[in-house]
Amino acid sequence: DAMVIQNPRYQVTQFGKPVTLSCSQTLNHNVMYWYQQKSSQAPKLLFHYYDKDFNNEADTPDNFQSRRPNTSFCFLDIRSPGLGDAAMYLCATSRVGSGASTDTQYFGPGTRLTVL
Amino acid sequence: QKEVEQNSGPLSVPEGAIASLNCTYSDRGSQSFFWYRQYSGKSPELIMFIYSNGDKEDGRFTAQLNKASQYVSLLIRDSQPSDSATYLCAVNMAGNEKLTFGTGTRLTIIP
């Protein structure tokens, strides 16, 4: 089945220790998104890739970076995690353009990040 | 004014009744509207999307869109305990690949 996969599902890191979260997709979608979601809050978009073009949200801290080496994979790097970065990190994909009828986003299962 | 507003709840509905979830949005250029279900500790799961005025039905779920009133709703018929979750409304504009989410409505179905 086509899907969005995130690894790891749970990540524990220490304050200030860099961490990388990964996302892969078999949907062949051209847009990939990273969201941060804290308890009882809406998902907050950090950035997204439209094909190879990187789009950063204005309020995304510099501590968060992303890489998309190919269509299928996207990574979220947190350079120096703080206690406030503990959250669920969600990867989503969509097919945009080329006559697509909707911009439906499909989410992966998420990575729960704990910062000690 | 928030761009997408939902009543945070909790909304409690007896099992077997109709649950009605509401969402309003501020941008008249919005074109596509989505309902996601999110169980506690899990990721959002697409329930329905709608982009034309009127009703769209899928099983026990009906999405209703009124662009003139900038209002979209989700009705769940014959509510089951497994429908207990947070329901997120999301909206996007034509030509914009981003979604704007509401904060979600927490729904509890009471057996």
Image (cartoon, coloured by chain):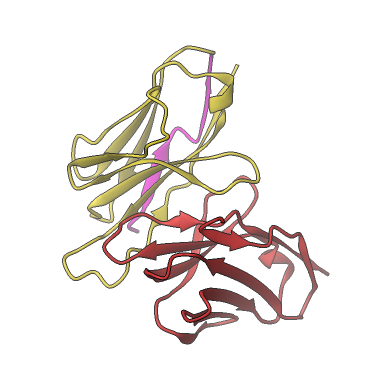
Judge from the rendering whether residue B37 lies leftward or rightward of residue B14; answer left or right: left
- Can you say whether A65 is above or below B56 in the image? above
Q: A47 or A12: nearer the eye?
A: A47
Image position of B91 (left or right of A49)? right
Apparent side of residue B102 relative to residue A17 in the rendered image (left or right):
right
Q: Residue furthest bottom?
A: B54
Quick check: is A109 in the magenta stretch?
A: no
Q: Position of residue B79 (x, y in %)?
A: 71, 75
The answer to whether A20 is drawn above or below residue A102 in the figure is above
- The residue lying furthest to the front in this view is B1
Q: Nearer the viewer, residue B35 or A62?
A: A62
| Whole-percent x, y for residue A13 in the image | 52, 18
In this structure image, what is the colour of chain A? yellow
Q: Residue at x 70, y 81 (%)?
A: B78
Residue A47 occupies quadrant: top left
Q: Residue at x 65, y 49 (%)?
A: B40
Q: What chain is the red one?
A: B
Is A24 placed above or below A77 here?
A: below
In the image, the segment drawn in magenta is A1-14
Residue at (35% x, 59% y) in the render: A1
Query: Residue A116 location, x and y as percent?
Result: 60, 16
Can you give x and y, in whole percent of width and height, for residue A27 in the image?
Answer: 28, 56
Q: Residue B57 or A85: which is nearer the viewer?
A: A85
Tally of marks: 0
